[in-house]
Image (cartoon, rainbow, N blue to C red):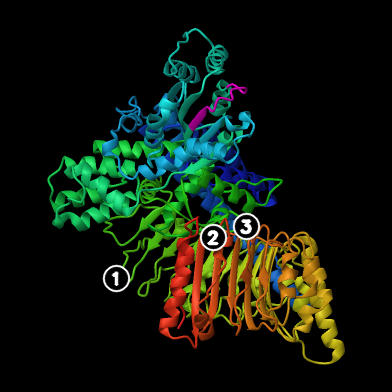
Amino acid sequence: MEGALVSACTGVMNSLLAKLSTVLENEYARKKTVGKDVLFLRSELSCMDAAMHKYATLSDEPDLQVRTWMKQVRELAYDIEDTVDAFMARNENSSSDNDEPTGMRGFVIGSIRKLRELLSSLSGSCAASQEIKELKNQVLEVNDRRKRYKLDVSVPMASSGSIIDSRLPAFYSEVGALVGIDGPMDKIISLLIREEAADEDADADADAGSLHEHKMVSITGFGGLGKTTLAKQVYQRIKGQFDCAAFVFVSQMPDMKRVLLDLLSGLGTTGNMWDDERQLIDKIREFLHDKRYLIVIDDIWSISAWEILKCVFPENNNSGSRIITTTRILDIAMLCCSTFKGSIYHIQPLSDSDSKRLFSKRIFHRENSCPSHLEELSKMILRKCGGLPLAIHHVASLLATKPSTKEEWELVLNSIGSAHENSHPLQRLKKILLLSFYDLPPHLKTCLLYLSIYPEDYKIDSKTLIRRWIAEGFIAQDRCRRLDQVAKSYFNDLINRSMILPVAIAYDGSVQYCQVHDLVLNIIVSMAKEENFVTVVNGQKCNSFTEKIRRLSLQFNDSEDVVMPTAKSNNICLRSLNVFGFNRKQVYHLANLQALRVLGLGYCLRLENHHIECLGNMLQLRYLVIHSQYVTELPCQIGSLKHLEVLDVTFCSIQALPETVARLRKLSCLYVSIATRLPEMIGNMQCLEELYHMSISSNNIRLITDLSCLTKLRELAITVEEPVGTKCYRSRYMDAFLASLGELGRHSLESLTLNYKGDESFILDQSMGSCFSTRHLRKLVIWKTLSRVPNWMSIVDSLIHLELYISRMERSDIDMLKGISTLLYLRLVFTGHAPNGAPTIDSQGFQDLKELHLLVFISGTWPVLTPGAMQKLQKYHLTFKLQKAQCDSGVLDFGLQHLSNLQHVCVMIIPSGATSEETLVAEDAIRSAISIHPNKPTFELGICE
């Protein structure tokens, strides 16, 4: 059952079939009244599942009859699984718990329980039998309907415009009609042509072969950003410098023989239709072997297509030929560039000013000419288009055919991105965007459609999203990887395919936050609604709700109330309830949510204890987030949630978790505030992988010992009080703590945040090093302010992330840290003084550091950067005290010029005796250093009063 999946295309069919098998195998299903019908359901549904998978893997949208039948099967599968879940839950709850009383009292209680179970079993068996018979009849009816309408011979829907290549208008665009293309075009030409000239000037005696080798640029990005247009303009600009040139389209489902023939034709030679692919490749290679050529291969969708196309380029051609490819998929761009010496160009959306220029030129035939009464609406429309040239062009084309009135423009604004919009330009836009969606495998379609729960412009935390996917059952089991690792690969696939957009990238290259383009969001919201996958309620007028809501997203804001569905049938079927936006007036009625898997109440500020009394009845719950200061305790019945995997009550006012939490044997993530006391017997929760925050009092040695049992723990934030009592007890306490940390380190611990409320000698002691020198530990944060960097840091050789608070800054401290060659991220807070002056960061050490945060609260100065320092550093954050003496000297050297790979700088100034005029002098010095940096890094500057 662990590998059973939930899919937007096939619903819970896989999960259901696995559960039906479990029911048949277990003892309670041997009753003939139930077992026979369950066997029939499993067999019949298996056949339906095969048909559903066939339709789900189509590369285009199935026709209306098939979609209707699939929806009926999905809904039926949900209903059957709800019945089976309730049936299994009744039997699970009848089993005795480990903490039941023993002796005479236990005998009496056990006898009464068994009598109740017998009576319940007799009545429950009849009820279950009747429910399953009714479901059996529904299955027969749905399957008969498929046979009656001969759905197996149905074909995907074909739009009337499907035979027209949507890239042709972009290919034949006039240069004068384009906006914002000059900068990208110059950049690509520089990568292709000008860098070669620079190489030749720098070394005239270099080997000619290396100077004239193949060079490639692969343009990648979201559909509609103008990759074809950009490639075509570069092609037109530079093709005269080559002996021959060609521009060929590949497309999503290419006829490779036709592509090769087009390439031959574009190069000015001919091929025969009766030639096979190998013969055509040989002809192209023979033609190109002694020529300097420029070839553009547009719109590559698959690795297999590139594997064929790369064969046309002769290996021994050293005449300085150039290749340009375009693709929506980053992995394919990387593969192309690995074949030849290549660079990836990530095409970006248009800026606000360029978007406005393009919009005005298309409608009013000149720039910045929008009538004043339409100015606000034009901003709203452009915001929806999100800098997508294709979207701006199509929406503007539609508006150009309509009267310039507010009413008409409002209608277009409301229709942008709708899956049901039938106007020709918007249908064409939708079709282009949907190409990427239908190219996804079923599991990625499911994960993408789930993003419809989020509001527009919402920054989605990747880690939270992954945990939600797992709880919903979207992630396939893998023998070699954890579920979160598999889910991370799904997430990266969607990023690589440009379906979701990264907005915050960490020092290790991972995406911390992402967003969905507004147009894509509108489309997937419509599709999720049509398939009853997700229902979004966001304050807009809604006259009715579907009879059975499976996943509900409530999106509030402070200015309006949201009309929430209240039908009892909705509650019974609800599997996921998510609230976004702070709601100060309403609380969703949480009773009767027996099928609920995911409950996200992160924004319910008015939530109180009595609202969550019914949590213990949500026996299918996997994911629970509650953030409200008015919640001061969790119900004891929470221990009944045997499937719970994530529990997050970080921002609640809970002093202690109930002891029953220790029964949650499947819990993998537990997030509580630093003030929340954990229950005894936490060692029973051996599936825990992430624990934030664990507080251990000075006399709780048992909790420390139990910590060592959590051998799957990968991330831990812990506060430890200094022990009080006899010397012997203090020694036992600290030995137990070190032993537990060492045990975790030997197993899975990757991240440790440690706050020690005691004397620093414990942290500085060399014995502490044995806990942190394990091969797994990647992140270490020590909140305790230390007088120096611990000597045991010299033996730590696996850290990539380190945060320390130091009261004294010496050169030896910096040298100690330089020795950790694996560091990518370093945050140092200097709180005291520097007796020997500011230390120096030079070319020795920190060779791989990508991100540095320095907070300097010292009556001296910040570390001095010298030539060759931190050549891979991309982000530099500096917070420092500005003294009058520094301003009087007239020299404020930040050493930024030595950081050759710098991309972003953030500086926070804390005036310390410096006047406002002197602070301005410091600001000017920082701005000047940024302005002359060759990388033109992005920049943030703040004054902390």
Q: Is residue 571 left or right of residue 484?
A: left
Q: Tell which of 612 and 820 is nearer to you.
A: 820
- The mark that comes first in sequence, 2 or 1, is 2
Is label 3 or label 1 in front?
3
> Where does residue 50 sit, x and y in percent of width and height?
54, 33
315 in the magenta segment: yes
Q: Is residue 76 above or below residue 554?
A: above
Residue drawn 63% across the image and 34% down it: 205
Is label 3 or label 2 in front?
3
Q: Dot 3 lies on which element?
A: loop
Res 118 → quadrant: bottom right
Mark 1: give few (<14), some (14-19) or many (20+) Cα within 10 Å: few
Q: Residue furthest bottom?
A: 725
Q: Quadrant of the C terminus?
A: bottom left
858 in the magenta segment: no
Q: Dot 2 lies on which element?
A: helix
Q: Is residue 270 above or below residue 71?
A: above
Q: Is residue 237 above or below residue 466?
A: above
Q: Is residue 115 above or below residue 176?
A: below
Q: Is residue 165 left or right of residue 757?
A: left
- Circle 2: residue type: Thr
Which residue is denoted by mark 1 in the rendering? 559
Q: Tell which of 934 and 586 is nearer to you.
A: 934
Q: Which residues are magenta?
A: 314-324
Q: Is residue 748 left or right of residue 137?
A: right
